[in-house]
Amino acid sequence: MKSAVKIFAGNASQDMADKIAKRFGVSLGEVSTVHFSDGEFEPSFDETVRGCDVFIVQSTPPPSENLMELLLMIDAAKRASAHKIVAVMPYFGYARQDKKGKPRVPIGAKLVANLLTAAGVDRIMTMDLHADQIQGFFEVPVDHLYASTLFLPYLENLNLPNLCVASPDMGGTKRANTYAKYLNTEVVVCYKHREKANEVSKMMLIGDVKGKDIVLIDDMVDTAGTLTKAADLMIQKGANSVRACCTHAILSGSAYARLENSKISELLVTDSLHKEHKSDKVKVIEVADLFADTIKRVHANQSISSNFIC
């Protein structure tokens, strides 16, 4: 006899969780939160989860309360005798801290993995990690989904005559090459040098973009500094047009101003992060169907390979 599925949401992903639950065919589970006067909070499941497969939907952008809420909900489900607990994290916060880039710094992504495991999670479901190797930080299964499943059909339907895929930095070349193989296009790469985080000091282009319709591929867009510099550089080098596909739309600081003042004609993102976008250039593709179908397959012990285009 299979365990019942119950889907719950943290505060950072209420809208997405509701869409996922509807696509799956269940009502979103009831959760309440007690807030103490000093800022401490205590989430509580308002329905039984005993013997159930519990899926907790929560992206973990700042503030750190989003991560803490997810950890507390996992702990509550474990102590309430849930059969299995799956953390559905469309956006995995702290993923940029995947290695020691200099002395005396943490590996934040590994710490988050340890915290989730210690809380009692049985499985992780996420999308477009900043680095694939973060999956190896876990001792539980990780279902790593890709927004390419959603972006590629959209790009194909554009029927761009001289399509060329680009990576805004060296670290994204593997991701860009995957898109290029599927679309049967060339790849160009930007080489950037940072003096400090979120600030690009110089950028160079590797490859020919003259007369091409460029699609920049990245896992996230934060301040949009790299993305807009890359787009403007490509237009200077003779590109016909530049658009971008970035899974996670962080868009902090002056990102929207940079985007509006740049040569990017369109920024395609997912709704992995709940935001009200301040630019008409931003087009949002929903991920609820993809996550709902993956949850169905995981619950039924079926392969999720059909959810990958490339």
Image (cartoon, rainbow, N blue to C red):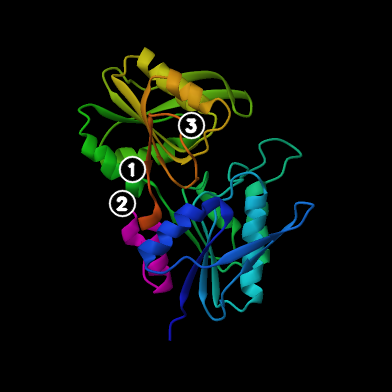
Distance CA(mark 2)–CA(mark 3): 23 Å
Q: Where is residue 216 in the image (x, y as percent from the top left)?
A: 39, 31
Category of crowding for the residue at label 1, using alpha-carbon neighbours closer than 10 angstroms: few (below 14), some (14–19), many (at least 20): some
- Residue 301 colored magenta? yes
Label 2 to label 1, Cα distance in Å?
10 Å
Question: Going 67% across and 41% down the picture, which residue do you hit?
Answer: 100
Asked if the residue at tag 3 contacts the one at tag 1, i.e. Cβ–Cβ closer than 8 Å, the answer is: no
**Is 102 positioned to the left or the right of 160 in the image?**
right
Give the number of the disc on residue 170.
Answer: 3
**Looking at the picture, how far across and down is residue 300, in whole percent?**
39, 74
| Mark nearer the N terminus (2 vs 1) | 1
In this picture, which residue range is highlighted in magenta?
Answer: 290-310
Residue on which disc 1 sits: 151
Dot 1 or dot 3: first in sequence order is 1
Residue bearing mark 2: 309
Question: Which amino acid type corresponds to the residue marked 3 in the rendered image?
Answer: Met
Residue 14 location in percent, x, y? 51, 55
Crowd around label 2: few <14 · some 14–19 · many ≥20 (10 Å): some
Q: In the image, what residue occupies the spot 45% across and 59% down?
A: 18
> Total of numbered circles in the picture?
3
